[in-house]
Amino acid sequence: MSGQALAQLEGVREDPGGFDLLAPDGTHYRVDVTDGVFDPRNPLLADRVEGRRVVAFVGPTVDRIHGDRLRAYLDARLEPGSWSVHTVDSGERNKTLASVERVCAVAKAAGLDRHGVMLAVGGGIVADVVGFAASMYARGIRYIKVNTTLVGQVDVGVGVKTGVNALHTKNMFGAYHPAHGSINDPALLATLPAREIRCGLAEIVKMAVILDSDLFRTLEEHPDAFLRSSDGALETYVLRTSMRLMMEELCPNLREHDLARLVDFGHTFSPVIETAGGHRLEHGEAVAVDMALSAHLARLLGLVDAESCARVVDLLRRIGLPVFDPATCTPELMTQALHASWQRRGRELHLVVPTGIGKADFVERLKDVPADVLRAALDALARDGGMS
């Protein structure tokens, strides 16, 4: 195919079965949306395996809920002796290089060769750990992920980043390693506890605030999305819109050559909120606090009107997410977070702030967030009521 023809296909294309992404650098991958991913009559997962040897990894909770059906599916669709299933510790504290090494050791003991496939079945942490292991194992092999959480389906599952925490820093080590297959089955979300749903909604609010006022209004009307009994039409709209927005935003800058990224909204202060708090808050909860703080900073800097700021904070609270954490939302720690982000992003701040509902921009310089403004934003959040 000519370069001109390839360029015409660049971008994200949606069809009833999912989304295809073709980046300007030639990277192509697909995210599938399916029903009954572990139903032996559904060929999708087996098709993605392509007859290769499979070593599958699942977290303990996912194994308890879905493990029997996963094994029955692999038994029905793959060749006998060509697959095995192993548990891997989940949770932020296990997102480490040691976990990656254990995954590689299990794969080697299971006889996985360079043509084999690692399969990650679980949430974002399992996908990050197994994906990073696959990027390293034998200098890089295929991996497939079945995303079982809302965060996984709208965030981790639609991108190419893998990684682990190290040196007291979130995602310090990692690789850009697109999955050979990424599969979302919305029915898997029905088994999630409410807290995990709310964490996923935080990432959806992120996309709505920066890119899509219609999605934001939908969430305002239905802050209990994915937590209620319904025909699923609302959830389908929210899920697919969030996936599409994320993939469209990632596509031109898939490997982050440009460190100014709108999808980093909620991800400037949240790494310190998570780590300094000993991971007491889940990732999505820390992102919610970050978004609320960033909205107040935008208001105080004259970048967004008070009504839009209030709508962002109010929606987070109505979903049941925290907008303030007294233990970590201190001027000292949040200043530390600003400096850490500035350093990580090539000594530019690139702080994403809303400029309206569905619109956002960057605060580029550290000096543009004066200490008194940061303190005033934290004081405003404290008055907003802290934990929901």
Image (spheres, rainbow, N blue to C red):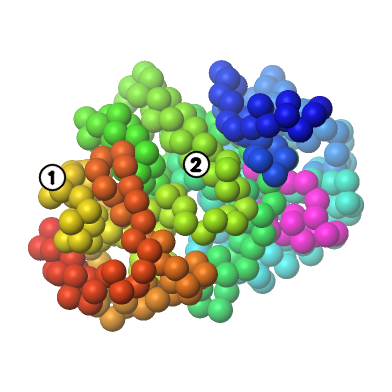
| Residue visible at 72% across and 40% down in the picture | 26
Q: Is residue 198 magenta?
A: no
Q: What residue is shown with label 1? A: 307
Q: Quadrant of residue 35?
A: top right
Dominant secondary structure, magenta? helix
Location of the C terminus by quadrant is bottom left
Q: Which quarter shows the N terminus?
A: top right
Residue 243 horizontal/vertical position (percent): 49, 35
Q: Residue drawn 57% across and 48% down? A: 253
Disc 1 is placed on an element classified as helix
Q: Identify the residue at horizontal 72%, vertical 66% (top origin).
A: 102
Q: Is residue 141 magenta?
A: yes
Which residue lies under the disc numbered 2? 249
- The one of 277 and 230 positioned closer to us in this rendering: 277
Task: Point out residue 252 in the picture as x, y percentages from the top left corner.
Answer: 58, 43
Taking the image as shown, residue 351 lies to the left or right of residue 63, namely left
> Residue at coordinates 76% horizontally, 33% vertically from top-left?
3
Whether residue 147 is visible to the viewer of this picture, yes or no, is no
Residue count near mark 2 (Cα–Cα under 10 Å), binned few <14, some 14–19, many ≥20: some
Above or below residue 92? Residue 130 is above
Taking the image as shown, residue 213 lies to the left or right of residue 23, namely left
Residue 38 drawn at (x, y percent): 64, 30
The amino acid sitting under disc 1 is Glu
Pick whichever, 53 or 48, lies toward us. Answer: 48
Image side of residue 151 versus residue 33, left or right? left
Q: Amino acid at mark 2?
A: Glu
- Depth check: give the residue in front, 256 or 165: 256
Magenta-tinted stretch: 129-145
Residue 7: mark in rendering: none
